[in-house]
Image (cartoon, rainbow, N blue to C red):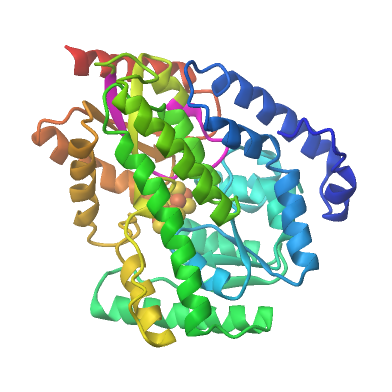
Amino acid sequence: MSEATVDYRPMWNELGLNLEAHDELLGVLSQSYSDIFMKQKNRPEGMAYFDFVMSEVHGLRIKELMDAKRDGRKIIGTYCTFVPEELVIAVDGVMVGLCAGADFALEEVEKILPRNTCALIKSTFGFKIGQVCPYLEACDMVIGENTCDGKKKAYEILNNLVPNFYAMDMPQMKTAEGRVLLKSEYLKLMAKLEELSGKTITIESLKKAITIVNNKRAAVQRLAQLRHADPAPVSGLDSLLINQVYFYDNPVRFTESVNKICDELETRITENSGVYPTGTTRVLLSGCPMAVPNWKVPSIIEGMNAVIVGEESCVGERGFQGEVSTEGETVNELMDAIVDRYLQIDCAIFTPNSQRLEHIKEMAEKYKADGIILYSLNFCAPYLMESFNIEKELENSGIPTLRIETDYSQEDNGQLKTRIEAFIERIND
Ligand code: SF4
Ligand code: SF4
């Protein structure tokens, strides 16, 4: 999305990107960013920082990563909120999210993956095969986790496509045994990161890292809380964007920027001003994570005189809830605190996962949602399976709920618009 005056092409070339394909991708992203984000009215001034980050998402931020590499720091790529950033920061590494939110090289991807694979996994492969993701190419190690079956099996193939791929196992149940497994996987990951970086994690380095990540989570939690206000002080689209930038940006700078925009939103709330009029229909989004530039469903919802007031998602509150205690006196005690916090993530790969339904209900109440949209990607068995029961339970509790299933293409835009419009009318009746 860079319209930079700086020429980043030598850097992209050094990373092995396919410059022609990459130009094409940036062109599409830039157009869709300006159509979706820059046309919004009454945006908080603090969004200028995030617009800048997005304009330089393949430029300045990648240069920062390359500078970090030259300083001997390691870049670690991840696909899941279960990978503890605390451990990466504790070895002075930089963690970046690699999930992609756009189709690319789909035809090539479908030669090595089944067609009925979710768009998130397909797009991960498309960005690799098409050589268009500078984050992935900058990584010294890529971590894949055994969460859903799709990812687990796809990683066996990705392992042959990316150098230094590291597979992390995951429990499927939050039992005592599940906890033991997660801790042992985190200890193995810690040892791997120490080996890769040549640095030993100490109680001091780990406490410092925990504090950095806790502060980052606290900032986005603060942003989330402010969305309870009516009129909404910030759009759902801009909030989602901040939650997406969470996975790319320098964590300390990101935290400062989020806190700054929160100060501005607090003033807006005091002045009773917002992005949409008081009484605008309020929607909670729940389901699969939305990676950049997957803004399709939110832009449809907010294009219909409704505002999104929260995301029950890993790119949202499911991913950043809770904090890690810094109370421990040994690395082992801090590792326990890390495991305790991460085991609270109510991802649909766990069974049973009733905690997630409770969390959705809590969020609906806290953010005064008038209705909930359950968003699943096609072929995502965990979230699709859960959505039936969740819809029933929410409707039984008197919360209007719409279940939608989609992908990254634009082909179903018309159908989605019709269904979402009818849902909003139903809420307002
Ligand atoms: S939805 Fe589950 S698998 Fe996906 S990022 Fe979140 S925790 Fe990981
Ligand atoms: S949990 Fe669903 S959306 Fe996420 S990678 Fe697996 S199938 Fe795709």
Q: Compared with residue 268, is residue 15 higher up or lower down, i.e. above or below?
A: below
Query: Does the magenta segment cover residue 77?
Result: no
- Say whether residue 230 is left or right of residue 165: left
Query: Does the magenta segment cover residue 282?
Result: yes
220 or 391: nearer the viewer? 220
Q: Compared with residue 73, is residue 379 higher up or lower down, i.e. above or below?
A: above
Q: Residue at x 36, y 16 (%)?
A: 276
> Where the C terminus falls, by quadrant?
top left
- Say whether residue 299 is left or right of residue 163: left
- Is residue 88 among the parts visible in the rendering? yes
> Where the N terminus falls, by quadrant?
top right
Q: Compared with residue 148, is residue 46 higher up or lower down, i.e. above or below?
A: above
Q: Position of residue 152 (x, y in %)?
A: 50, 64
Residue that sits furthest to the right in the current view: 10
Q: Position of residue 382 (x, y in %)?
A: 35, 52
Q: Position of residue 67 (x, y in %)?
A: 78, 60
Locate ligand 1 by image quadrant.
bottom left
- Is residue 404 among the parts visible in the rendering? no
Q: Quadrant of residue 410?
A: top right
Q: Residue at x 56, y 69 (%)?
A: 89
Give the magenta part as a residue range.
Answer: 281-298
331 or 374: nearer the viewer? 331
Q: How many marks?
A: 0
Q: Residue at x 30, y 26 (%)?
A: 270
416 or 274: nearer the viewer? 274
Q: Position of residue 388 (x, y in %)?
A: 23, 41
